[in-house]
Image: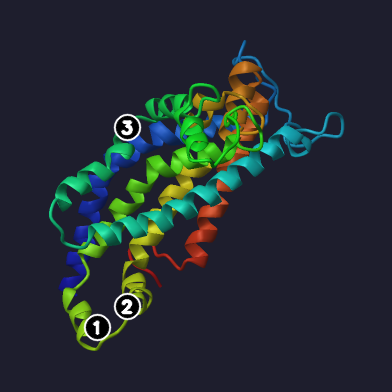
């Protein structure tokens, strides 16, 4: 009984300490989100956001001009976003685990290598975008020059101008920049594993690959799932890298870039808010699906 009273007292204390943060979160995130969802059902424009009318679901679908659900550019942006998310997060997870395993092995200069690996992640995204924009330049870029010297390509490739290569090039830049984030989280999980398990496996003569799949991977799975969810959420709302490297190019346009174009360039607050609302719903649904299918508990660990 005393334990229950003590638990309730701890819960009350925790709620008191969390109250200011929850209030700040409601003001900083809840209010803008609520306004965006409301504008999605209006015909508001950027020229006069104080004068608008409620139009129901007409921004999403209507028999006259189709709406967002029949907008080919919107579905192109959805496809680009899903392609970017799946490919970049998959590559970053595989490479991040590999780099973390390498950095977990003791060797001379490991601290310097660990710090050097984090450099791409520390560089601001806009700087990375401009730097890789010059490296991928079709006439003066380092990538074309190196590829031609190695015999990989016969002539310079317009990486960012071609719809066939632009999005893949952006994925490559994102993988270069964000893989250290995945490696850092996985390395932290590896550092927490008990070493006597590996010593016992070594004495029993178990192959290292089998030890990885039977021991290491299951033990780091909770941290790995959290890292994948974080990166997935970040990739689904990707904006800065695409916009800095290709602007409003349709072949690389993500859902965030599409919403910005409608809101700012076309000043259609209602239509742009509808796109932002669908992006929010899609992120929420995919996150719930990953948490359910991955059996991840938000209170910690994996079911």
Per the image, label 1 sits on a secondary structure element best described as helix
What is the spatial separation of the Cα atoms under label 2 and label 3, in whole angstroms?
A: 35 Å
Rendering quarter of residue 247: top right
Residue 179 rendering spot, x and y as whole percentages: 38, 47
Residue nearest the viewer, comparing 214 with 101: 101
Dot 1 and dot 2 residues touching (CB under 8 Å): yes
Q: Nearer the viewer, residue 69 or 251?
A: 251
What crowding class fits label 3: few (fewer than 14 Cα within 10 Å), some (14-19), or many (20 or more)?
A: few
Residue under the image location 60 percent in, 28 percent down: 158
Judge by depth and name the residue closer to the eye, 251 or 103: 103
Q: Which residue is mark 1?
A: 201
Q: Earlier in the sequence, mark 1 or mark 3?
A: 3
Q: Quadrant of residue 19?
A: top left
| Label 1, residues with CA under 10 Å away: few <14, some 14-19, many ≥20 | some
Residue placed under numbered mark 3 in the picture: 123
> Residue 80: percent from the left, percent from the top?
62, 41
What's the CA distance linking mark 1 and mark 3? Answer: 40 Å
Looking at the image, tell me whether mark 1 or mark 2 is earlier in sequence order. 1
Q: Residue at x 29, y 40 (%)?
A: 21
Write down the residue under mark 2.
Answer: 211
Q: Is residue 281 above or below residue 226?
A: above
Does residue 236 appear left or right of residue 271 in this picture? left
């Amino acid at each position: 009984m005393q334990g229950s009273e003590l638990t309730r007292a701890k819960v009350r204390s925790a709620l008191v300490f969390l109250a200011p943060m929850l209030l700040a979160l409601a003001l900083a995130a809840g209010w803008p989100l609520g306004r965006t969802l409301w504008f999605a059902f209006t015909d508001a424009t950027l020229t006069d956001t104080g004068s608008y009318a409620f139009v129901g679901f007409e921004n999403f679908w209507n028999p006259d001009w189709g709406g967002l659900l029949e907008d080919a550019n919107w579905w192109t942006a959805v496809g680009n976003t899903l392609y970017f998310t799946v490919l970049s997060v998959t590559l970053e997870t595989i490479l991040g685990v590999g780099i973390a395993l390498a950095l977990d092995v003791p060797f001379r200069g490991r601290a310097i290598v660990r710090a050097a690996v984090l450099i791409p992640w520390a560089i601001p995204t806009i700087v990375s975008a401009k730097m890789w924009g010059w490296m991928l330049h079709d006439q003066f870029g380092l990538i074309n020059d190196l590829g031609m010297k190695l015999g990989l390509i016969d002539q310079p490739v317009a990486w960012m101008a071609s719809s066939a290569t632009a999005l893949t090039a952006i994925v490559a830049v994102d993988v270069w920049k964000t893989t250290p984030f995945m490696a850092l989280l996985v390395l932290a999980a590896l550092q927490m594993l008990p070493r006597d398990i590996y010593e016992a496996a070594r004495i029993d003569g178990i192959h290292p690959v089998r030890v990885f799949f039977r021991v290491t991977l299951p033990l780091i799975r909770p941290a790995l799932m959290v890292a994948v969810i974080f990166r997935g959420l970040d990739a689904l709302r990707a904006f800065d890298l695409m916009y800095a490297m290709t602007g409003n190019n349709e072949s690389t346009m993500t859902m965030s870039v599409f919403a910005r174009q409608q809101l700012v360039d076309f000043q259609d607050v209602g239509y742009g808010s509808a796109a932002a609302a669908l992006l929010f719903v899609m992120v929420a649904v995919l996150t719930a699906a990953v948490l359910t299918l991955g059996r991840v508990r938000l209170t910690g660990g994996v079911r």
